[in-house]
Image: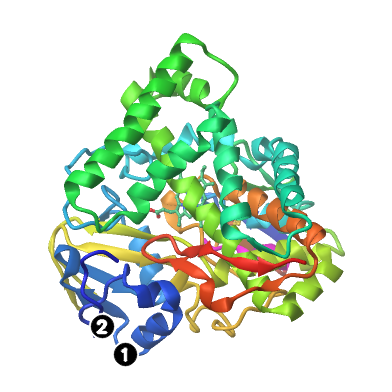
């Protein structure tokens, strides 16, 4: 599984990095960005889905197959 | 409120300052969503009210057809101060908006806000300590109300003993929307005279605070004009106080009225972060507004230039098309794309601060008073209009 923040949609609500702090971090403006290449290590899939389910701007992109 | 006749038909003659809206807007929105999802009223010179999530979102995203020149519905249309507007960035449209917002993002980013948590907690503890030993206290007036005022005063580097003074200005501007224009202008004038004095003091004695930071900030390679800084600081006061007060108060009201949720939160403090988002969804305090830029047929609604459009994020948050069990408070809700802090480019700059204040305020309160109930449900008084929250909230703590 892979997680990615669509920067064209992100407005910095910060739900993603609160719910999945091991996968997403805040940049200096408060926008979300994936840590590293965004691949989700085993055990963090639920956190990744929580981030996806709570972004009001639909800016969290989840790729289940990679 | 004021001289407005009571509303008889919410689809054709609504008024968001009506007492019925303040008391229970949810029934109004649910009914409109089913029967007339974009309502219209001739009041305020013409105003529209979408109640579906997707319509509220579409208008929030549509900066081509809707302007943020003024975001509080009043009887008169504000002078055109574009591109900046009176209180940037909330009153600014693209492309000016982006730069005016950008200067605010670093001091309000989560990393910066985390540093304010210890002093916020200490202040909340001071407030609850003063209430201990009493039977009945007012959780809105004696607790919730003080927290955001003190926090923003400290951030801006304003004298903390002035807190009461500028809270008065804020009430006048936000809750006095039905006042005659002369009185409103007078109220704004007092606020800006106060801010001007603070700015002058900071120009003479720069210090490590948000006011000095803004006076040194640049936009497009030029320092912000003093008028811009004054408008932005005015906005931080106007946008940060009643809103956060309302969110803390509404959350405490819910917990006082729903012992199951209160008991569960006391037993499972780690649930608070999730529960808080649900309380923000269910009791979102803030409704914004836009002005229609030019005549347009919007999904069949004949909107005219300079008509108001209310953006009721609280109604969007209750739309069953967007949320399961939209009308119920589910404190462990896992899927929650609520828009209490807006949607799109004007997303609340203060949301990380507001969330920190709300979390700390609830933590400290629940630790001090794990058992509390509504002392007199009929005595609870809600402010309506564009910022909804309890202004009187007697609770029994003893
Ligand atoms: C629970 C408390 C709060 C709620 C529910 C809330 C809600 C909102 C909403 C819905 C907007 C969007 C405005 C629009 O679309 O026109 C907004 C904007 C804004 N809020 Fe908040 N707010 C809260 C607290 C705060 C605090 C504490 C501050 C700062 C001290 C703040 C500062 C701002 C600013 C500066 C904007 C304008 C952003 C822009 O136009 O780019 N808010 N807020
Ligand atoms: S929750 Fe969505 S909008 Fe907010 S920071 Fe994360 S990606 Fe951006």
> Residue at horizontal 18%, vertical 63%?
B44
Q: Position of residue B393 (x, y in %)?
A: 57, 66
Q: Position of residue B299 (x, y in %)?
A: 24, 76
Q: Residues within 10 Å of mark 1 (few under 14, many from 20)?
A: few
* Whether residue B339 is situated above or below residue A28 in the rendered picture: below
Is B341 on the left or on the right of B303, as rendered?
right
* Whether residue B394 is situated above or below residue B321 in the rendered picture: above
> Residue at horizontal 69%, vertical 53%?
B361
Q: Position of residue B160 (x, y in %)?
A: 57, 31
Q: Quadrant of the C terminus of chain B?
A: bottom right
Q: Magenta segment, principal secondary structure? A: helix
Is B336 on the left or on the right of B43, as rendered?
right
Residue B11, which numbered label? 2
Q: Residues within 10 Å of mark 2 (few under 14, many from 20)?
A: many
- Whether labels 2 and 1 belong to a single chain: the reply is yes
Coloring basis for residues: rainbow
Q: Report the span colored magenta.
A: A49-57
Is B31 on the left or on the right of B245, as rendered?
left
> Residue at horizontal 76%, vertical 54%?
B364
Residue B35, which numbered label? 1
Q: Which one is in front, B27 or B392?
A: B392
């Amino acid at each position: 599984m892979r997680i990615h923040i669509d920067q064209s949609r992100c407005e910095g609500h910060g739900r993603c990095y609160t719910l999945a702090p091991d996968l997403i971090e805040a940049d200096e403006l408060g926008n979300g960005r994936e840590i590293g290449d965004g691949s989700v290590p085993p055990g963090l899939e639920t956190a990744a889905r929580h981030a996806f389910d709570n972004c009001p701007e639909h800016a969290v992109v989840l790729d289940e197959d990679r | 409120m004021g001289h407005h006749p009571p509303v008889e038909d919410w689809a054709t003659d609504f008024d968001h300052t009506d007492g019925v809206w303040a008391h229970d807007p949810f029934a109004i929105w649910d009914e409109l969503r089913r029967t007339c999802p974009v309502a219209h009223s001739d009041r305020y010179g013409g105003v529209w009210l979408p109640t579906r999530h997707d319509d509220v979102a579409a208008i929030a995203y549509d900066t081509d057809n809707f302007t943020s020149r003024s975001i509080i519905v009043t009887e008169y249309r504000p002078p055109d101060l574009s591109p900046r507007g009176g209180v940037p960035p909330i009153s600014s449209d693209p492309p000016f908006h982006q730069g005016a917002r950008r200067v605010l993002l670093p001091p309000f980013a989560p990393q910066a806000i985390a540093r304010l948590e210890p002093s916020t907690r200490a202040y909340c503890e001071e407030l609850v300590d003063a209430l201990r030993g009493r039977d009945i206290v007012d959780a809105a007036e004696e607790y919730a109300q003080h927290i955001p005022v003190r926090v923003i005063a400290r951030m801006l580097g304003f004298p903390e003993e002035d807190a009461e003074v500028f809270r008065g200005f804020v009430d006048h501007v936000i809750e006095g929307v039905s006042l005659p224009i002369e009185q409103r202008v007078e109220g704004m004038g007092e606020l800006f005279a106060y801010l001007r004095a603070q700015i002058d003091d900071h120009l003479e004695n720069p210090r490590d605070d948000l006011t000095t930071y803004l006076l040194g900030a640049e936009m497009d390679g030029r320092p912000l004009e003093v008028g811009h800084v004054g408008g932005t600081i005015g906005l931080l006061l106007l946008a940060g106080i009643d809103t956060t007060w309302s969110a803390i108060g509404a959350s405490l009201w819910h917990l006082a009225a729903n012992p199951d949720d209160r008991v569960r939160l006391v037993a499972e403090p780690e649930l608070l972060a999730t529960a808080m988002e649900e309380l923000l969804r269910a009791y979102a305090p803030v409704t914004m507004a836009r002005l229609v830029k030019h005549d347009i047929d919007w999904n069949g609604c004949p909107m005219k230039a300079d008509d108001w459009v209310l953006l009721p994020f609280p109604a969007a948050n209750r739309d069953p098309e967007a949320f399961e069990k939209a009308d119920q408070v589910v404190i462990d809700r896992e899927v929650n794309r609520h828009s209490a802090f807006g949607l799109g480019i004007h997303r609340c700059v203060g949301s990380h601060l507001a969330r920190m204040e709300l979390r700390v305020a609830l933590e400290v309160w629940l630790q001090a008073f794990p058992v509390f109930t509504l002392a007199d449900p009929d005595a609870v008084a809600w402010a309506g209009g564009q910022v909804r929250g309890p202004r009187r909230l007697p609770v029994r703590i003893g």
